[in-house]
Image (tube, rainbow, N blue to C red):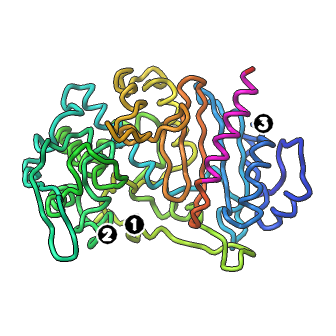
Amino acid sequence: MKIFLRNSPILLGGLLAALSLCPIAGVSAADSQTPASSEVTEAMKPWVDQHKIAGIIGIMADRDGTVRYRNLIGYADVEAKKPISEDNVFWVASMTKMFAGASIMMLSDEGKVSLDDPVTKFIPQLGKWMVTAEKDADHILLKPLERPVTIRHLLSHTSGLTGLSEFQQEVAADGASLQARALSSVTGPLQWQPGEKYQYGNQGMNLAARVVEIVSGMSYEDFLQQRFFDPLGMKETTFWPSEAQIARLAGAYGPNKDKSGYAKGDITFLKKPYNDRVHRFPEAGGGLFSTVHDILRYGTMLANNGELEGKRYLSPAAMDELRKEQTGKTKVNYSLGYHLRNGMFGHDGAYGTDLSVDPKSGLIAIFMVQCTSGDQWTARDRFLEVAREVYAKKAQ
């Protein structure tokens, strides 16, 4: 791929020096007329300078899905000096949670499930749940539930469940079926009464996905494929990337020990090989791989209040539920598989991928990185801050 600096009126000597290892990458001819944002380039400079993030894609699109600014900075493969590209595949991790919430709301629109349904309505075996009342090195005191765990509790991280069940910790996050993981959750007691506290994790999302299977009569992967991925044209979003997709997987990097370069990491959360459909199963809390194109398609549907190109996926009432805080008295800025930030909603993933949609302005902001150092969050927050400023100026 040809490397060059695109459409940026400000060429900074310091930035050029910083990008001697991580140059700003070009895009395909079809996208060559979409400008980069010089403000985004400058804002991301510290993370590149300090070898914290090897490759960054920052997209700003409007409500109709038109990309207004497109920044591609650095490498997808540092060792091979392959620039980051919109052709790259990313592990989007916890962005996967958005689809659990959307699936439940789609079934709610059809009158098949309610957010306040007890989980035991669909999985009666979970009626044996107990709650930890006391715990120390010598004993655990369990008490009955004061109220049932509901679907809303599962999707808002207020169920009392731990992040992963004991069984899941043994067999790997994606090492057993959703049915097996759902039933195994009863062996680990809830950590508090349902609705009383917020604790982020994946177990609730996998239980919600199992409810989707039971209610729809379809496997969770088939439900997502037929209800979201195929009709939205999300051709590369999958729990099982092919060999060709794995070859395009953006590398995960952080700084090396002396911070003079990059150290390559790995996706330790999932089992390998990623294309193994026999021994790997859908991880509804963090198992999807995707691309910029596919995330933009989904984000455009969200920005249009659940509708895209004449097809309605989610009702306005369902979208209202996804956009409002759902954690009860804990008042955490979280909905039903969606983060809520400064008037935007969406979700991020462990290595820094992020979709954020502003329903008022129509801004769709996509941040795609694979960062292992923990520096992805400050970079993401800075990108969103600048993206909103740049987008607002253009709208004036």
Q: Is residue 265 above or below residue 223?
A: below
Q: Is disc 3 placed on a helix, strand or loop?
A: loop
Residue at 79% in and 49% down: 42
Q: Is disc 2 placed on a helix, strand or loop?
A: loop
Q: Mark 1 points at which residue?
A: 270
Expressed as whole percent of the image width and height from the top left, the position of residue 352 reads 56, 55
Expressed as whole percent of the image width and height from the top left, the position of residue 90 reads 53, 56
Q: Is disc 1 placed on a helix, strand or loop?
A: loop
Q: What stretch is highlighted in magenta?
A: 378-395
Asked whether 339 falls inside the magenta stretch, the response is: no
Residue at 63% in and 49% down: 86
**Separation of residues labelled 2 and 3 (CA atoms):** 45 Å
Q: Mark 3 points at which residue?
A: 33
**Separation of residues labelled 1 and 2 (CA atoms):** 7 Å
Question: Tags 1 and 2 in contact by the CB under 8 Å rule?
Answer: yes
Question: Along the line of sight, which residue is nearer the eye, 339 or 235?
Answer: 339
Q: Name the residue under label 2.
A: 172
Magenta region, mostly helix, strand or loop?
helix
Expressed as whole percent of the image width and height from the top left, the position of residue 121 reads 10, 40
Mark 2 or 3 closer to N-term?
A: 3
